[in-house]
Image (cartoon, helix red, strand yellow):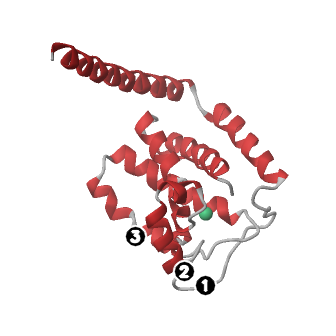
Amino acid sequence: MKYKTHIAFSTLAGVCVAKFLDIPFQTDYVMGVAVGSLLPDIDHPKSYIGKKLSKTSRVMSKTLGHRGLTHALPFWLCLFPLGFFMKENVFLGLWIGYLFHIVGDLLTVAGVPLFYPFSKARIKLPLAFKTGSSVEKGVFIACLLLIIVSMDANMFAELSSSLAIQLQALLKMASELINSLLIR
Ligand SMILES: [Zn+2]
């Protein structure tokens, strides 16, 4: 899956999980989902996140290979303790986004070693498609539409008010910075 499809697919899953588990649907959660949906591909230097963190990505690619450990459920479970050091909403987003990256890659022909290191077998789901194919483009568009359809009014309200609060904080920081520069 391409990175855009991963973000859309994990965000759709993030909307459904937030609804089901009553997780506050705020910008920190959504950003967590988006980042989590990209993280597993850090083992590929040419992936979107691999290009951003090129040194780490090259080391991981050499030691782990693409779609190895980072695409396995046991590794995903091992990330859970990170939750004790992060803001709950951000971590939940990251963890959910990460999981649904793996699920997304299960839908591709190359599959993933889901139970690595216990089994190296690559698993894919029936109806798997090729990365970058027209089917994937269809999946991307369907995910975007389903995100809008699945979000209820409360979720839209929660997301927009948390976005407004963050924008306000950002504007306050910018005006304080400008003031301090002007005073000097
Ligand atoms: Zn992947």
Q: Secondary structure at mark 1?
A: loop
The one nearer the camera, 136 or 55, is 55
From the image, tell me which residue sits under label 3.
78
Query: Is 152 located above or below residue 58 in the figure?
Result: above
Q: Quadrant of the C terminus?
A: top left
Q: Quadrant of the N terminus?
A: bottom right
Residue at 38%, 46% (x, y): give it. Answer: 90
Marking on residue 111: none
Residue at 26%, 18% (x, y): give it. Answer: 178
Marking on residue 120: 1
Q: Find ligand 1 in the image and state its quadrant.
A: bottom right
- Which mark is first along the chain, 1 or 3? 3
Crowd around label 3: few <14 · some 14–19 · many ≥20 (10 Å): few
What percent of the width, then of the height, locates residue 168?
35, 19
Q: Judge whether residue 24 can be spotted in this image.
A: no
* 93 horizontally vs 121: left or right: left
Residue at 71%, 35% (x, y): give it. Answer: 145
Question: Which residue lies most toward the right here?
Answer: 134
Confirm or deny contact between disc 2 and disc 3 (CB under 8 A).
no
From the image, tell me which residue sits under label 2.
116
Query: Is 127 located above or below residue 140 in the figure?
Result: below
Tag 1: residue type? Lys
